[in-house]
Amino acid sequence: MGNKVGTFFSATLLLWLLSVLFQTLFNHRTDLLSIIAGSLFYQTSNFLIRLFFSTHANSNPLFVNTSVSLLHSSITSVSVIFVLFRQLVSHGLSGMFDHSQLVEGTWPWAFEALCFSCGYFAYDQWDMLHHHLYNGWIPSILVHHLVLLICFTLALYRNVTINYLILTLICELHSIFLHVRKVRRMVGIRDRKSIIVQLEWLLNWGTFFVARVASHILITVKLIKDAHKFERGIVLPLALCGMAGMNILNIGLGMDLFKAFKRERKTQQSNKHHHGE
């Protein structure tokens, strides 16, 4: 079954790549080259991490994958903040979230940022398939990446809802601390009493509720509120389905995060009790 799952997602990734190459070469969409650039950048980062951190990388491909994911979350967060701040300074808050701006307009550097992030998801899909970093008959992480690739790429092809998608990427601020937690545990930093670990958990929960949960709920509310302003077609249904999926994933992620928090706390208490004896 594992081979069938891998074959299916590998085939979809290949079809996606052929689609991007077709658009770039035959439809002269050179603006989409940033997607390829993103994939190459993160693949190169993968290689460099393996080269310079061979102790962890050789024994655990997940360490490399998570490190690159941390890099992506950091770069994307900075990019999104830059795009939003630049737009805020230039045009103010009043017209920034106007329906026409979010759907038909494209903020400066938003298109490139979305392309680069799209390239990452393609790279990450390949890396997880190559190293079998997934579980189950329907691996949620592979499905997540496939859905994002489809939504992002269709938006980039049609040049619509670019700004909406940039807003959804605010959640990468939270992803930074998710990846930091995984990396620090893999390198052996697990003392919950450590100031670093406590600060990480504080930022983890804070960004989870603000950058992920609140932002995605607000985007969903905005879509519903402006539903009558959308033209007939697939844009609104696709956007609503995408946000519904993200909100559901956020609930699952929150539950997993809470379990991890309790598990670390329980482990710390158990170790304390053991040493006390």
Image: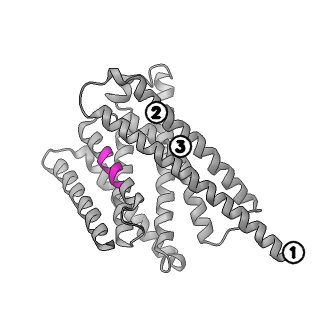
Q: CA distance from mark 1 to mark 2?
A: 50 Å
Q: Quadrant of residue 39?
A: bottom left
Other-residue count near label 2 (Cα within 10 Å), few / some / many at <14 / 14–19 / ≥20: some
List x then y, in percent, for residue 149: 32, 50
Residue 276's label in the rendered image is 1
Residue at the extreme right: 276
Per the image, label 2 sits on a secondary structure element best described as helix
On the rendered structure, is 247 left or right of 107? Answer: right
In the picture of the structure, the residue carrying the numbered disc 2 is 219
In this picture, which residue range is highlighted in magenta? 145-151
Q: Is residue 100 above or below residue 117?
A: above
Q: Is residue 203 above or below residue 267?
A: above
Earlier-in-chain disc, 3 versus 2 = 3
In the picture of the structure, the residue carrying the numbered disc 3 is 212
Circle 3: residue type? Arg
* Residue at the (56%, 49%) spot, across then down: 174
Circle 1: residue type? Gly
On the rendered structure, is 64 left or right of 272? Answer: left
List x then y, in percent, for residue 140: 41, 58
List x then y, in percent, for residue 259: 62, 58
Other-residue count near label 1 (Cα within 10 Å), few / some / many at <14 / 14–19 / ≥20: few
The prevailing secondary structure element of the residues shown in magenta is helix
Earlier-in-chain disc, 1 versus 2 = 2
Q: Is residue 215 above or below residue 3?
A: above
On the rendered structure, is 78 left or right of 32? Answer: right
